[in-house]
Image (cartoon, rainbow, N blue to C red):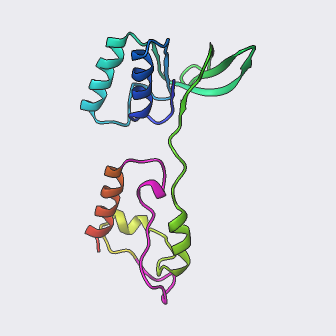
Amino acid sequence: MYDGTGRHPAPQFAAFAAALGRDVSLFSIDAQLAQELTYAERAIWKKRIYELGLPAVYDHQIERVERSGNRIAASFRNLVTGATLERTADQIVIEHGTIPADGLYRQLRPHAANDGVTDLDALLAMRPQPRRLRPGGQFELHRIGDAVASRNIHAAVLDAFRLCAAA
């Protein structure tokens, strides 16, 4: 199992597969398990992974996946040393999140007064967003949550709060 996001899906899948009796190893691009989660969530996952006896390798980026006979070989590069590590398995699961769900944003953007652009300087200064890009626009539009990247609902709510609190 390769974790490229540092959130719940990778350790959840690894624990599920291990509980079914599968031989599982967990690789992560991050320096620790579930790095993007809160301390409490990380501690729960860490305990579960230890209880299951799952080997975990951190600071490794997946570089290549290819067939090796009737198995699959994956190459990982250590982000600290640059050394390459190869593992062969029957199956390799890669968690890289999702692509942005921004179809609606793209459809609405030509009609937005701000052309869908968020002024980060104004946002950080808690000032209202300028609407000068398209004066005839019908509304203000901003990309938040999964319209930006693979994120959870809490990130979207926080983005919306920051934008609305400055209005």
Query: Residue shown at 42%/77% (left/top)?
Result: 140
Q: What main secondary structure does the magenta stretch of the protein show?
A: loop
Query: Residue 60, how many percent across, how many down?
Result: 54, 24
Res 48 quadrant in image: top left
Relative horizontal placement of residue 102, taking residue 45 as reference (left or right): right
The number of callouts visible is 0
**Residue 36 in magenta?**
no
Residue found at the far right of this picture: 69
Residue 146 higher or lower than 25, as above or below: below
Q: Nearer the viewer, residue 129 or 67?
A: 67
Res 54 quadrant in image: top left
Query: Residue shown at 49%/71% (left/top)?
Result: 116
Query: Residue 130, how many percent across, how many down?
Result: 41, 78
Res 78 quadrant in image: top right
Q: Quadrant of the C terminus?
A: bottom left
Magenta span: 130-152
Residue found at the far bottom of this picture: 136
Residue 140 higher or lower than 21, as above or below: below
Residue 54 higher or lower than 41, as above or below: above
Q: Nearer the viewer, residue 53 or 137?
A: 53
Q: Nearer the viewer, residue 65 or 77?
A: 65
Query: Residue shown at 50%/67% (left/top)?
Result: 105
Query: Residue 75, how many percent across, how many down?
Result: 65, 20
Query: Residue 44, how many percent across, how many down?
Result: 27, 25
